[in-house]
């Protein structure tokens, strides 16, 4: 957004991907250092909400603007 020089809105993504062999949700993300592996999606979200801000705060200079995380989950079902 113009008129806000030096302040960058930053957007990251976190994907929860189901691993059927290990029966866990595993994270795929562009947040360096964020690794999540949980048995349920609810746990995954709880861990993400707790860890992501801490890791981003440790990684970034404080001059950043708004930081948002785009969260999605993907699971493939065999139906036949």
Image (cartoon, grey):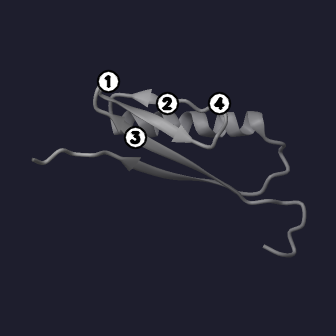
In the image, 55 versus 24, the foreground residue is: 24
**Of callouts 1 and 3, the N-terminal one:** 3
- Tag 2 residue: 36
Q: Quadrant of the N terminus?
A: bottom right
- The number of numbered discs placed on residues in the rendered structure image is 4
Q: Residue at 87%, 75% (x, y): give it.
A: 3
**Of callouts 1 and 2, the N-terminal one:** 1
In the image, 33 versus 42, the foreground residue is: 33
Q: Which mark is residue 22?
A: 1
In the picture provided, is 67 more to the left or to the right than 73? Answer: right
x, y percentage for residue 72?
44, 51
- Tag 4 residue: 33
- Tag 3 residue: 17
CA neighbours of label 4 inside 10 A, class few (<14), some (14 to 19), many (20+): few
Per the image, label 2 sits on a secondary structure element best described as: loop
Q: CA distance from mark 4 to mark 1?
A: 22 Å
Q: Quadrant of residue 25?
A: top left
Q: Residue reaching furthest right?
A: 5
Q: Are marks 4 and 1 in contact (CB under 8 Å)?
A: no
Q: Are marks 3 and 2 in contact (CB under 8 Å)?
A: no
In the image, 63 versus 13, the foreground residue is: 13
x, y percentage for residue 41?
35, 39
Q: CA distance from mark 1 to mark 3?
A: 12 Å
């Amino acid at each position: 957004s113009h008129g806000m020089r030096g302040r960058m809105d930053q957007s990251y993504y976190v994907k929860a991907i189901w691993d059927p062999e290990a029966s866990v949700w595993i994270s795929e993300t562009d947040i360096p250092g964020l690794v999540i592996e949980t048995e349920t999606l609810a746990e995954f979200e709880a861990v993400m909400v707790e860890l992501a801000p801490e890791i981003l705060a440790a990684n970034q200079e404080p001059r950043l603007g708004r930081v948002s995380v785009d969260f999605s989950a993907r699971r493939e079902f065999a139906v036949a």
